Amino acid sequence: MKRLVVAAGLFVFAFTANAAERKPEEIYPKTCALCHANAGTGAPLAGDAKAWAPRLAKGIDTLVTHSSNGFNAMPPKGMCFDCTPDEFKALIQFMATPK
């Protein structure tokens, strides 16, 4: 039983340590790009500072909440079901930055 508890603890640590190290450049193509790289979806395109400006004016915390809980056509968690609030913040900043 003790080995099982230790193994489970190591698994959780490894998973959270790995998730904390993910960069938006790694997450974006697998998740956000589905909508944020395709015109006509209604999502602001990544790199389009003009489209992101009114959203950023609401504050990053609001955008993280919208990303986590869903907002208008964006479903809860977008397509990143394992993203943390910090990762959503990094993804928003990544997408809002002109390319």
Image (spheres, helix red, strand yellow):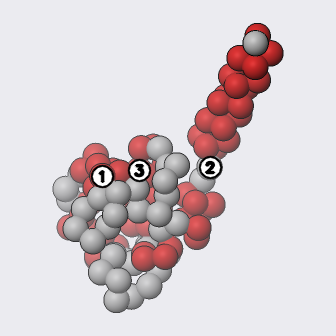
Q: Are marks 1 and 2 in contact (CB under 8 Å)?
A: no
Q: Secondary structure at mark 1?
A: helix
- Which residue, given by chain and number where applicable, does mark 1 sit on? 69
Does residue 6 appear in the picture of this structure?
no
- Marker disc for residue 22: 2
Q: Secondary structure at mark 2?
A: loop
Mark 3 to mark 1 CA distance (whole Å): 14 Å
Earlier in the chain: of badge 3 and badge 2, it is 2
Residue 47 position within the rendered picture, expressed as x and y whole percent measured from the top left: 43, 74
- Which residue, given by chain and number where applicable, does mark 3 sit on? 89
- Residue at image position (67%, 28%) is 13
Circle 1 residues within 10 Å: few <14, some 14–19, many ≥20? few
Q: Amino acid at mark 3?
A: Lys
Location of the N terminus (image quadrant) = top right
Q: Which residue is situated farthest in the right direction here?
A: 3
Mark 3 to mark 2 CA distance (whole Å): 12 Å
Residue 32 position within the rendered picture, expressed as x and y whole percent measured from the top left: 48, 68
Residue 22 position within the rendered picture, expressed as x and y whole percent measured from the top left: 62, 49
**Left or right of 41, for residue 46:** right
**Left or right of 25, for residue 52:** left
Q: Amino acid at mark 1?
A: Asn
- Against 39, residue 59 (above or below) is above
- Residue at image position (33%, 75%) is 44
Q: Secondary structure at mark 3?
A: helix
- Residue at image position (24%, 50%) is 62
Earlier in the chain: of badge 1 and badge 2, it is 2
Q: Amino acid at mark 2?
A: Arg
Mark 1 to mark 2 CA distance (whole Å): 21 Å
